[in-house]
Amino acid sequence: MSLPATPSNPVTPDAASSVLSLRGVGPGIAEKLGRLGIASIQDLLFHLPLRYQDRTRIAAIGSLRPGDEISVRGEVQLTEIKHGRRRMLLSRISDGTGFLTLRFFHFNARQQAGLVRGARIHCFGEVRAGNGGLEMAHPDYRNIDDDDNAADETHLTPVYPVTEGLRQLKLRGLMDIVLADDALLNAQLADWLPSRCLPSEKFPGLVDAVRYVHHPPPDAPVQVLQEGLHPSQQRLAFEELLAQQLSLRQLRAKHQHHVAPPLGGARTLSQRLLSSLPFELTRAQRRVADTIFADLDQTIPMQRLVQGDVGCGKTIVAALAACHAVEAGYQVAVMAPTELLADQHRLNFAQWLEPLDVTVTWLTGKIKGRKRSDTLSAIVAGDAGVVVGTQALFQEDVVFHRLGLVVIDEQHRFGVHQRMALREKGARGPAKQRQHPHQLVMTATPIPRTLAQTAYADLDVSVIDELPPGRTPVGTVVVSEQRRDEVVARMHQACREGRQAYWVCPLVEESESLQCQAAQETAEQLQQALPDLRVGLVHGRLKSAQKEVEMQQFKAGEMDVLVATTVIEVGVDVPNATLMIIDNAERLGLSQLHQLRGRVGRGVSKSSCVLIYGAQLSKLARERLAILRETNDGFVVAQRDLELRGPGELLGTRQTGLVNLRIADFQRDQHLVPAVAECAEYLLREQPRSVGPLIRRWLGEGLQYSNV
Ligand code: ADP
Ligand code: MG
């Protein structure tokens, strides 16, 4: 199910609209354009600039700052070849306001001769701070006469994504050809958006918008353009978000044509489960469970996302849904992103369901050989009622007898492609009457509403917005690692009072083994410093049996401190643990920190979370951590996390179909989303024929999941 991201899946165009019909494009160039996802002239026009260069002005050298990308002119003061580790040509120029060093690693004798003392040159490049003042590496430059006053360009210069062998100049040349031809432009750019749907009167028509972004006029507001906020850019961003949304909704509609087994019925199992619980459902749990039960009664496959802050009790809701499936004679697959979390689910489901005579089976990648084939047989024979596991559940050799419900926990870890693929899994029977399982996905990453509307437009969303009673809010403190000893002392105190603590060591290096090593060392140090405490350790490199032993000891209170890598992020439930200490907290995203924090505060005693940061941390980064001190609300945290990191991270970078946006930006363009949703409704209702072309224009075939 590997699916190339947009834009590498272009639609094959007819001859008149193929790039091959353009002057200067032969098979060689066409092949390179193809690598950029460009097959048609329309594709070319939607190959949008990443940013702009301003070659219209000439700056005084004395006014330059590192990071500027700018033109300057000056007289050469000195040119010399330096033999350091690499041979290079250095040339110092001045315009009377200051000096600038030009640095060339590749140069020839002719270039060197052109840069003699006294020569006047014009150059464009990026300014950086060098050892001896400001410099430019490999600027574009030319020699000029005294009376040459012309700037390079009269409009801003677009900078495009390029590929090996296809340079900016070539792409700009091709754009020039197309943009100069009004008839061609109008033929290629059908404008499907009725003006009544556009959220701003300032939005231009499609042709004007496209022309503007490729060739901003000389008086274009540079700053606004660089930020992507010009009405022409916003017009295109709007259309792109619309195409994304339409594509997901189309997918949703397609699945609603599928048939699912109705899983309603007596509901005695779920009643029995409920009455066996030591607690009552919260109102929010009950509401969401009822919604799910109503979905399961239907013959349309449920496609529901349950969002709820960490600790709100999503698992029991999933278990109740599982009861319905089992009672109707179907199997349930429960999938979690990590072995540890899957294991936790297995324990929960077994504890809840086995007393009701439901078999709970377990399948992960680590189960091999005889054990595996036995498990597979039980699944295919239908003896396994509920099967809990990791991604291993969806490998090809896993065949279900009658799969009625798929539960995916922490779905943000999986990404949109997997979500689609899992939906197909378990579809059985001859094509015509094939049955598709219901699908319930759960996430503790509360993504902001506007983002949810776009990213999960293919799902119904329910929110569990209430925590079970008796939870105490977690107090959070942010401290420098210089105060580590105090933290250790405080932990010592808490443990002597009978409480337990987690000590989390996040990824310091991009390497799992180093991470495990860091956790191991921390555990040893703590044990040495606090010989009267029992310090345990879990990390990804331990055998699952050993992990289980450690977890069980911690759970049983036979251990005071559990040192862990981020493997405990999800799934651990120990009410007596009241202290969560996170080392190198600055390395984690806010939402992830929030989830870790949710591991404490599960009992009646007051809990705390201590975020330790490295001494070198910037003020901004400390302020970021302080957000967690200010709020315990996962939605607020997620919103701030989104602002700080962008949605790619929040949704998991693998959601390629969603983050490879050409011009829109989920964060910047959130304000467009309500109008996008309305426009999507309108188009689906009033002009459904424009939907397919709109999707293809922006996504190619990239988001067509039919064959994942
Ligand atoms: P999450 O939504 O983060 O997955 P869990 O399903 O793991 O949360 O639930 C957290 C803990 O709260 C579990 O121990 C669970 O048994 C317990 N729990 C769930 N619902 C309730 C409730 N209504 N009242 C009390 N405890 C509950
Ligand atoms: Mg959970």
Image (tube, rainbow, N blue to C red):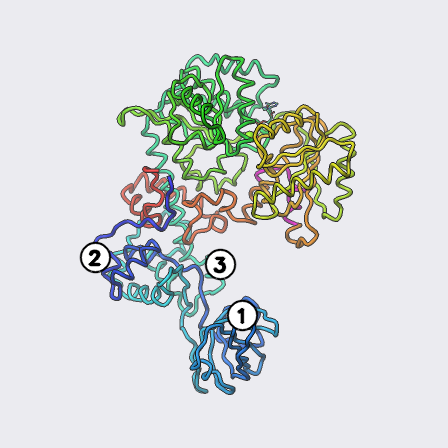
Which quadrant holds the N terminus?
A: top left
Mark-to-mark CA distance, 1 and 2: 44 Å
Quadrant position of residue 373: top left
Looking at the rendered image, the disc whose residue lies closer to the viewer, 2 or 3, is 2
Which of disc 1 and disc 3 is earlier in sequence? 1
User: What is the number of the mark on residue 227?
Assistant: 3
Local secondary structure at mark 1:
strand
Which quadrant holds the C terminus?
A: top left
Q: Which residue does the numbered mark 2 point to in the structure image?
A: 16
Mark-to-mark CA distance, 3 and 1: 20 Å
Q: Residue 49 placed where, x, y %?
A: 40, 60
- At label 2, counting other C-alpha atoms closer than 10 Å, the crowd grade (few under 14, some 14-19, many 20 or more) is few
Asked whether residue 628 is drawn in magenta, I would say yes
Q: Residue at x 35, y 62 (%)?
A: 211
**Residue contact between numbered discs 3 and 1, judged by CB atoms under 8 Å:** no
Q: Which residue does the numbered mark 1 point to in the structure image?
A: 127
Q: Residue at x 43, y 45 (%)?
A: 656
Q: Residue 187 placed where, x, y %?
A: 25, 57
Magenta highlight: main SS: helix
- At label 1, counting other C-alpha atoms closer than 10 Å, the crowd grade (few under 14, some 14-19, many 20 or more) is many
Mark-to-mark CA distance, 2 and 3: 35 Å
Mark 2 close to ligand 2, CB under 8 Å? no
Which of disc 3 and disc 2 is earlier in sequence? 2
Q: Residue 383 placed where, x, y %?
A: 42, 16
Which of disc 2 and disc 1 is earlier in sequence? 2
Q: Amino acid at mark 2?
A: Ala
- At label 3, counting other C-alpha atoms closer than 10 Å, the crowd grade (few under 14, some 14-19, many 20 or more) is few
Local secondary structure at mark 2:
helix
- The answer to whether residue 504 is visible is yes
Look at the image and give the residue range highlighted in magenta: 623-635
Depth check: give the residue in front, 88 or 282: 88
